[in-house]
């Protein structure tokens, strides 16, 4: 039991997923494992975890955690994921829930306790390994206390003296900021409560703990690593990050092309390649029929949007431009959930434009793949986007992204009319710029189909696999002393 590099994260595809974090944890550790690095993942055992395809067994019963009071323990389950061990932290009252972090009423009231427990249980589990990990790689606020625990453990416990930590920021806006009283029993010493530690304007800030104590900090795209040093994108932590700028690295996420591949895809009625996109037209026809849309849309542009219905994803801009889009005689399919008011608004639009628009308040892998394959244009008007994975999937599926030029979108889309364009981007983050960019894409689709096909060919040829990203992470680990 054990590994040289241990990933700690709150979700991991295919076992659990709310978005890009789950996809990253399903791909990056495995990519490193396939390069010969001994990796493992520690993640919660949720009530709605996907286990059907994997043999998950009890590995450790009554693991001592001692939070929120001394007798508290966790059970640890283990699965083999393509040759790599995954450890699941289980305690019913914390993780047996339909949703991971929140429901339609907001965040769960005990999220601080849940993820203090998770971080402490992960630390306790690693102490049972035959050897201490060489690298602990923690992800986002839910795992951000792990670098802090390691920092203080190294001071007093020889077991940890050679272990180093990496902390990856997937989304700086979600920081895990809680009342100061929750610090008292979290397991960190009083000295951690300072402006150089976990304290943030009188609150207990998990994200700040990761930033303050990790040996290296990464973000999920080079451009985002620059943006978060500014007041506009720094979410009030820009000065903290500026103080640790020498440890900050931007490494672009990759796409898992074993999963997101139109050439070999169990969800699609017809597969296709960049050299033969007839299957894409068949996917479009099938989805139009499945959703009950106007069959005339088979010869018109189909637009897709997949994402959580929150401000970050630009859903308000999407709502603003829907009437103008419908005037252009296009189809629109929206897949997402997460905000009751926006869900209702989008469902109302579907009633207003019943044969041209479909809103699906949900998220399933099958629908996401079908919409990517069926759409001609993919909408991604994010107000900020640390990396974004759906635009990488859209490129591989030959679906032209129309996206704001922020974060990883800036790093991955070459904007028309550049001669090597792979999509369309807009600089000014507002509804007017968004509809103008969509109009450009529709105009090329309608009036210059040869150019549109060339863009599709370039987009599908783009390579954002995890292989090169994994090499960058391996180099970072080696800087910290990883011995392979």
Image (cartoon, grey):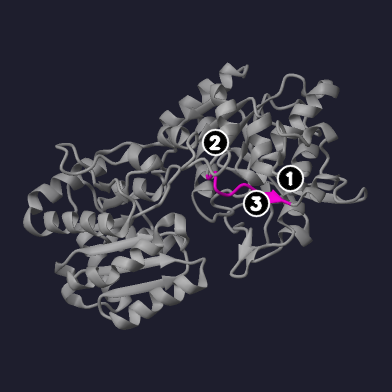
Which callout, 3 or 2, points to the residue nearer the camera? 2
Work out whether residue 89 or residue 302 is closer to the camera in this orientation and state it. Answer: 302
Q: What stretch is highlighted in magenta?
A: 171-178
To which residue does mark 3 refer? 55
The answer to whether one can see residue 99 in this image is no
Q: For residue 238, which numbered disc appears in the image?
A: 2
Report the side of 325 relative to 14 (left or right): left
Q: Do the residues labelled 3 and 2 touch (CB within 8 Å)?
A: no
Q: Earlier in the sequence, mark 3 or mark 1?
A: 3
Q: What element carries label 1?
A: loop
State the image quarter where residue 356 is shown.
Answer: bottom left
Q: Residues within 10 Å of mark 2 (few under 14, many from 20)?
A: some
Report the side of 27 relative to 332 (left or right): right
State the image quarter where residue 5 is shown.
Answer: top right
x and y percentages locating residue 144 in the rendered image: 67, 40
Q: Is mark 2 on a helix, strand or loop?
A: helix
- Which residue shows up at 71% across the image and 56% down it? 111
x and y percentages locating residue 383 in the rendered image: 40, 51
Residue 173 part of the magenta segment: yes
Q: Is mark 3 on a helix, strand or loop?
A: loop
To which residue does mark 1 refer? 202
Q: Are marks 3 and 1 in contact (CB under 8 Å)?
A: no
Q: Distance between the residues labelled 3 and 1?
A: 45 Å
State the image quarter where residue 91 is shown.
Answer: bottom right
The answer to whether one can see residue 417 in this image is yes
Placement of 283 over or under 241, stated as above or below: below
Work out whether residue 335 or residue 23 is closer to the camera in this orientation and state it. Answer: 335
Dominant secondary structure of the residues highlighted in magenta in the image: loop
Residue 420 part of the magenta segment: no
């Amino acid at each position: 039991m054990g590994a040289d590099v241990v990933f700690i994260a709150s979700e991991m595809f295919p076992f659990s997923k709310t978005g890009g974090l789950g996809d990253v944890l399903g791909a990056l550790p495995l990519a490193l494992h396939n390069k010969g690095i001994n990796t493992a993942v520690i993640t919660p055992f949720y009530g709605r975890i996907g286990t059907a395809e994997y043999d998950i067994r009890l590995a450790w019963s009554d693991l001592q955690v001692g939070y929120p009071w001394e007798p508290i323990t966790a059970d640890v389950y283990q699965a083999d994921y393509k040759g790599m061990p995954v450890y699941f932290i289980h305690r019913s009252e914390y993780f047996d829930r339909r949703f991971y972090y929140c429901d339609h009423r907001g965040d769960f009231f005990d999220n601080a306790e849940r993820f203090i427990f998770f971080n402490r249980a992960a630390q306790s589990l690693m102490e049972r390994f035959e050897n201490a990990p060489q690298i602990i790689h923690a992800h986002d606020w839910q795992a951000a206390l792990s670098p802090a625990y390691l920092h203080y453990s190294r001071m007093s416990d020889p077991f940890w003296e050679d272990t180093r930590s990496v902390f990856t920021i997937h989304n700086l806006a979600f920081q895990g900021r809680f009342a100061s009283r929750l610090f008292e029993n979290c397991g960190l010493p009083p000295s951690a409560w300072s402006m150089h530690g976990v304290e943030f304007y009188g609150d207990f800030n998990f994200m700040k703990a990761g930033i303050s104590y990790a040996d290296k900090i990464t973000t999920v795209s080079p451009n985002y690593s620059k943006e978060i040093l500014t007041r506009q994108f720094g979410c009030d932590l820009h000065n903290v990050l500026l103080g640790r700028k020498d440890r900050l690295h931007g490494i672009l996420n990759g796409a898992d092309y074993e999963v997101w591949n139109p050439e070999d895809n169990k969800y699609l009625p017809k597969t296709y390649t960049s050299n033969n996109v007839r299957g894409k037209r068949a996917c479009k026809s099938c989805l139009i029929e499945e959703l009950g849309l106007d069959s005339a849309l088979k010869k018109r542009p189909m637009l897709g949007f997949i994402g959580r219905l929150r401000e970050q994803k630009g859903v308000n801009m999407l709502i603003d431009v829907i009437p103008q889009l419908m005037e252009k005689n296009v189809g629109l399919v929206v897949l997402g959930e997460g905000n009751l008011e926006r869900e209702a608004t989008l469902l109302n639009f579907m009633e207003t434009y019943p044969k041209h628009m479909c809103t699906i308040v949900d998220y399933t892998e099958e629908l996401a793949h079908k919409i990517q394959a069926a759409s001609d244009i993919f909408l991604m008007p994010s107000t900020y986007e640390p990396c974004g994975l759906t635009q990488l999937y859209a490129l591989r599926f030959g679906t032209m992204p129309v996206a704001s030029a922020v974060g990883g979108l800036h790093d991955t889309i070459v904007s028309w009319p550049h001669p090597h364009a792979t999509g369309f981007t807009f600089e000014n983050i507002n509804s007017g710029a968004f509809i103008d960019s969509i109009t450009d894409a529709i105009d090329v689709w309608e009036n210059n189909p040869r150019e549109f096909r060339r863009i599709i060919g370039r987009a599908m040829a783009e390579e954002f696999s995890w292989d090169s990203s994994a090499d960058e992470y391996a180099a970072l680990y080696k800087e910290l002393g990883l011995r392979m």
